[in-house]
Amino acid sequence: QVQLVESGGGLVQPGGSLRLSCAASGIIYNIYTMGWYRQAPGKQRELVASITSGGSTNYADSVKGRFTVSRDNAKNTVYLQMNSLKPEDTGVYYCNADRMIWPSANYWGQGTPVTVSS
């Protein structure tokens, strides 16, 4: 079965750092664009960062310069390094795998909560 297993979330003070990991199984990982989304309380889920199979990255304006997305294809794992965290970064972070060729497919991880609070 397809699984996206996330880890690394937790409680951190403003200005701190966390590294999220998402390990994929059950898919041909290298043909998927991998993304990180977050959902804050009372808000819709939004894209935080993504990385294509070729290594091209995209970031939300709110996290540019602070977050870095990367992937280790040998480990079928995508990472989100989060630095200089702010309270507004609080939310549940979800790993996403998006197949870019037919047949289309889209998978989500279970989510890992991140709380940035003093």
Image (tube, rainbow, N blue to C red):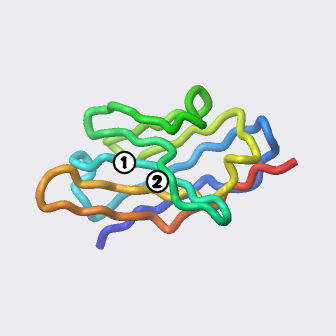
The residues bearing labels 1 and 2 have C-alpha atoms spaced at a distance of: 9 Å
Q: Is residue 8 above or below residue 60?
A: below
Q: Position of residue 109 (x, y in %)?
A: 45, 64
Q: Are marks 1 and 2 in contact (CB under 8 Å)?
A: yes
Q: Amino acid at mark 1?
A: Met
Residue under the image location 60 percent in, 37 percent down:
62
Q: Is residue 24 left or right of residue 32?
A: right
Q: Is residue 29 left or right of residue 113?
A: left
The residue beneath circle 1 is: 34
Residue under the image location 23 percent in, 54 percent down:
99
Q: Extreme top residue here?
A: 65
- Under circle 2, the secondary element is strand
Q: Quadrant of the N terminus?
A: bottom left
- Under circle 1, the secondary element is strand
Residue under the image location 41 percent in, 64 percent down:
108
The residue beneath circle 2 is: 22
**Which image quarter: residue 43?**
bottom right
Q: Is residue 16 left or right of residue 64?
A: right
Q: Extreme bottom residue here?
A: 1
